[in-house]
Every structure is written in structure tokens, then in C-alpha cells.
Amino acid sequence: MRLFLLCLGLSILGVVALTACNSAEFKNAKTSPSAPAGPAAPASDGARRVTVAELKGLLDSGEAVVIDVRNQSSYDAGHIPGSTLIPEGEILNHISELPTNKLIVTYCS
């Protein structure tokens, strides 16, 4: 009986956690289409965010490079054209390969 209750409790906890994650993604996806397309405001972690339109402009003008930090199978399933795969755990091993005169844009989703 204890095992059953423990499994039930863990299952409910897992569902609540997944629901919370999905609701945050859903809320973020429901942004207004009339929002300005200018540079995104800095996030609380200090990292600059770029919009899709801004990234396209930066790539077209040669001012940025895109680094995909996901794993190989995710990259193979689909990626930004022209992006370079460097999994997150290997970034420091490839630091010398990154340009110093361009904006480095990383993405993981």
C-alpha cells in the first residue's frame, strides 16, 4: 500500500512539474504579433537576446555566427541553416575556433 501511494504521489508530482513547464512555454509563445521587432531587452542573466528578424539581419551582413549547442541527433533533426554544431559541454574545447570580431549567437531549442 505504501509503495502504491508513493508511486501515485510521484506520478502526480511529475505531472504537475510537466504542466508547469508547458504552461510557461505556452504563455511565452502567446506574445503579441504587434510587438516591436527591435533588439530584445537584456534578460536577468545578463545575456543579450536577439529576435529572429535581428538575427537574420546580423547573419546577412556577416556580423554574427550561430552556434547550435544541442546534441548531434537534435542538430540532425533540424537546425538554423549555416549554424555550427558545438555541444554545450564542448564549448570550452572549441573556444579558439570562435571568431572574435563577430557576435556569437548560441541556441538550444
Image: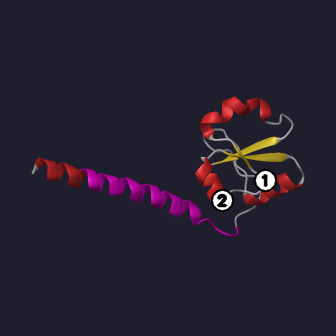
Query: Between 100 and 34, which is closer to the camera in this rendering?
Result: 100
> Rounded to the nearest whole Å, what is the CA distance between mark 1 and mark 2?
12 Å
Query: Between 57 and 30, which is closer to the camera in this rendering?
Result: 57
| Residue 20 as seen in the image, left or right of residue 45 | left
* Magenta highlight on residue 21: yes
- At 83% across and 34% down in the image, what residue appears? 100
Q: Mark 1 points at which residue?
A: 82
Res. 31 in view = yes
* Magenta highlight on residue 49: no
Label at residue 4: none
| Residue 67 as seen in the image, left or right of residue 27 | right
Magenta segment: 10-34
Q: Where is residue 46 in the image (x, y as percent from the top left)?
A: 66, 38
Q: Mark 2 points at which residue?
A: 78
Amino acid under label 2? Answer: Gly
Query: Between 101 and 42, which is closer to the camera in this rendering?
Result: 101
- At 79% across and 34% down in the image, what residue appears? 97
- At 26% across and 50% down in the image, what residue appears? 10
Amino acid under label 1? Answer: Gly
The quadrant of the picture occupied by the C terminus is bottom right
- Examine the image and state in which quarter residue 16 appears: bottom left
| Residue 41 as seen in the image, left or right of residue 5 | right
Secondary structure mostly seen in magenta is helix
Instruction: Please tell me whether mark 1 sits on a helix, a strand or a loop.
Output: loop
Depicted 71 relative to depicted 24: above or below:
above
Instruction: Please tell me whether mark 2 sits on a helix, a strand or a loop.
Output: loop
